[in-house]
């Protein structure tokens, strides 16, 4: 039994040595979309655009600002999975 444990340990360690190092992806890896639920040119839009300049410089990723008007600021992206589920229930 002792020889079997030694063989299993040796095999495991040799396989771990062959796998190499795994590195994580840099975050974020895609452009960031910020949804503004009010029209362009308003206070919310101006504040988000000021923040997006700082975020772009800090994160090094492009920032896309998407203004969606409607429902008193409670608008939802039509492409979201929750929105598609609500549309199919009706």
Image (spheres, rainbow, N blue to C red):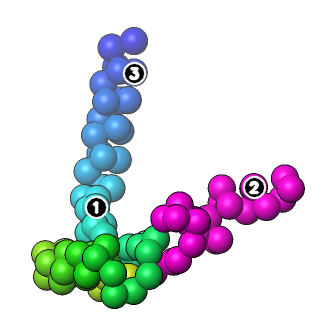
* Quadrant including the C terminus: bottom right
- Asked if labels 3 and 2 touch by Cβ distance under 8 angstroms, the answer is no
Corner quadrant of residue 22: bottom left
> Can residue 64 be seen in the rendering of this structure?
no
Corner quadrant of residue 11: top left
Q: Position of residue 18 (x, y in %)?
A: 30, 55
User: Quick check: 82 left or right of 59?
Assistant: right
Residue drawn 33% across and 14% down? Answer: 2
Q: Which residue is mark 3?
A: 4
Circle on res. 14: none
* Quadrant including the N terminus: top left
Q: Is residue 27 above or below residue 47?
A: above
Q: Which residue is mark 2?
A: 86
Of badges 1 and 2, the one in the foreground is 2
The earlier-in-sequence mark between 1 and 2 is 1
The earlier-in-sequence mark between 2 and 3 is 3
Residue toward you, 80 or 75: 75
Q: Position of residue 8 (x, y in %)?
A: 38, 29
Q: Residues within 10 Å of mark 1 (few under 14, many from 20)?
A: few
Q: CA distance from mark 1 to mark 2?
A: 36 Å
Q: Which residues are magenta?
A: 67-90
Q: Position of residue 65 (x, y in %)?
A: 38, 82
Of badges 1 and 3, the one in the foreground is 1
In magenta segment, residue 64: no
> Can residue 81 be seen in the rendering of this structure?
yes
Q: Which residue is mark 1?
A: 24
């Amino acid at each position: 039994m002792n020889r079997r444990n030694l063989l299993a340990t040796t095999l495991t360690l040799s396989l771990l040595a062959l796998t190499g190092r795994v590195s994580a992806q840099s975050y974020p890896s895609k452009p960031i979309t910020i949804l503004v639920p009010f029209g362009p040119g308003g206070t919310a839009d101006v504040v988000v655009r000021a923040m997006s300049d700082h975020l772009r410089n800090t994160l090094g990723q492009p920032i896309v600002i998407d203004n969606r008007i409607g429902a008193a600021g409670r608008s939802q992206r039509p492409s979201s999975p929750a929105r598609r589920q609500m549309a199919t229930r009706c």
